[in-house]
Image (cartoon, rainbow, N blue to C red):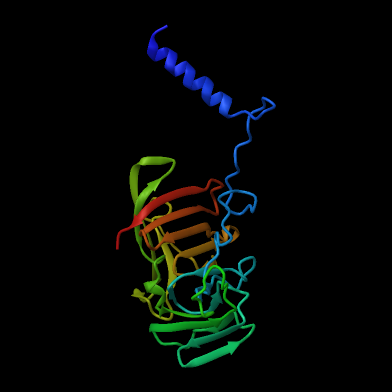
Amino acid sequence: MKLGNFILVYLLLLFLHSCKDDSGEPTPQPCNDPTDINCPNYDPCFEKSPVKADFTISGALSNVLPYVDSFVVDTAFHGGQLKFEAVDKEADYYKWYLGTEIVEGPNEHTVFRTINNLSKGIYTAALMLQKSPDSVCFPFDDGIDSTNQIFTKVDICDLAVVNKFKGVYESNPEDSITLEIINWNEGQNEYCTESSRIHVINFGGNKDTLMLLFDIVGLANSVLIANNPPLGGLDGRIDIDVKNSTVSAFYRFYNDSTYKQFNGIITE
């Protein structure tokens, strides 16, 4: 046997011997779990955090079942009800600053407000909360934190979902197509007026235009849900990824049992 091979065999036997206890059984390896107090890498502060006043702003998607209790987190809203919701629901005290209004109390982790009467523009919301800090993991935490966000009240025509999109159907990925959603008064040929209604263009692939008069059951900056096949309308959902300017639309028409899946980008 060559010397090199002999050394390798010797080291392997030495390693196997070291992995056994006096009984000859393999020595159990230590566990690796920071949440298990019996493991050598146990960390009592694992996944813990100091007191934080993080919160979300979301808008009501619809007042129609089954979406009446659905809210969509966003930064742009055209009306309806907003929900300001603290991430931490177990704080001792909450104090909200919503424009000039102050809402505070030990149970005010969630606040609802209607913004229909607000003018278009940018608004601020802030939260300050108090909570007994974890002095072991965060000895310098005073238990008080505050944070703020901005949101925008927009016209319906400024919603991300009211846009033009270019993409492909999954059933025909080689052939691109352009779809569009507009807010239009067909009779007066006016856009974005109080009498305008949401229309979808080219969703049938024939340069067609369909007004969603009674079809829409959910509408937000990044979501449109329609469900009205019996009356000749559209059935499906359009979702916008605002950050990446992409769109996903899954829908069918009243006279077609087959759903289409469209994926694309915002072009305007």
For the N terminus, which image quadrant?
A: top left
Q: What residue is rendered at 67% in x and 25% in y? A: 24
List x then y, in percent, for residue 15. 52, 26
Looking at the image, which is closer to me, 62 or 152? 152
Looking at the image, which is closer to me, 201 or 113? 113
Evaluate whether residue 256 shows in this view.
yes
**170 relative to 113, above or below:** above
Q: Is residue 230 left or right of residue 268?
A: right
List x then y, in percent, for residue 118. 45, 87
Looking at the image, which is closer to me, 18 or 184? 18
Q: What residue is rendered at 47% in x and 16% in y? A: 9
Q: What residue is rendered at 54% in x and 84% in y? A: 113
Q: What residue is rendered at 46% in x and 93% in y? A: 100
**20 relative to 151, above or below:** above
Point out the residue furthest to the front here: 22
List x then y, in percent, for residue 212. 49, 66
